[in-house]
Image (cartoon, grey):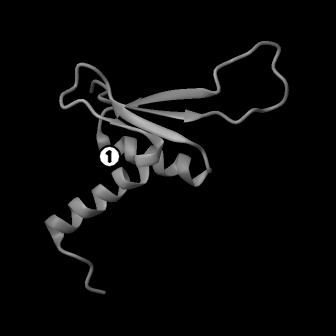
């Protein structure tokens, strides 16, 4: 399946490197659900993360780090719309 989503996250520095490198890394995912799962893991590590769709995917989306939590919460809201709120 062709990747549709990307997630960019900061890379922690480990030791000294002989040359400069980008402080960020990007991974691609076929589905939004896969991207959200990866984002949750990186947030649990305390890393700064942002995500979006890869061109020419429509609708184009860019989720900056300030909106990542709301984007993840939208998934919970969507689930509740389909299944109803938890009744525990």
- Percent position of residue 78, x then y: 21, 59
Residue drawn at point x = 54 percent, y = 50 percent: 43
Left or right: where does residue 24 sit relative to residue 30?
A: right
Image x and y of residue 41, in percent: 52, 50
Quarter in which the N terminus is drawn: top left
The answer to whether 22 is drawn above or below residue 84 in the figure is above
Task: Looking at this view, name the residue that lies furthest to the bottom.
Answer: 88
Q: Which element type, helix, strand or loop, lies under badge 1?
A: helix
Q: Position of residue 29 (x, y in %)?
A: 37, 33
In this rendering, is residue 51 above or below 42?
above
Image height check: is 58 above or below 76? above
- Give the residue displayed 25% in from the left and 63% down from the top: 77
Residue that appears at 29% across and 29% down: 4
Quadrant of the image occupied by residue 55: top left
Q: Residue at x 30, y 62 (%)?
A: 76
Q: Residue furthest left?
A: 82
Residue 30 pos. (x, y %)? 31, 32
Pick the quarter of the image with the C terminus.
bottom left
Dot 1 crowding, Cα within 10 Å, few <14, some 14–19, many 20+: few
Q: Which residue is mark 1?
A: 33
Furthest toward the front, the residue is: 66
- Among the 4 quarters of the image, the one containing residue 85: bottom left
């Amino acid at each position: 399946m062709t990747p549709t989503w990307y997630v960019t996250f900061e890379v922690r520095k480990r030791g000294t490197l002989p040359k400069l490198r980008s402080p960020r890394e990007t991974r691609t995912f076929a589905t939004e659900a896969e991207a959200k799962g990866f984002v949750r893991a990186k947030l649990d590590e305390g890393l700064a993360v942002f995500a979006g769709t890869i061109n020419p995917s429509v609708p184009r989306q860019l989720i900056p780090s300030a909106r990542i939590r709301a984007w993840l919460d939208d998934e919970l809201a969507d689930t509740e719309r389909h299944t109803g709120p938890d009744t525990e």
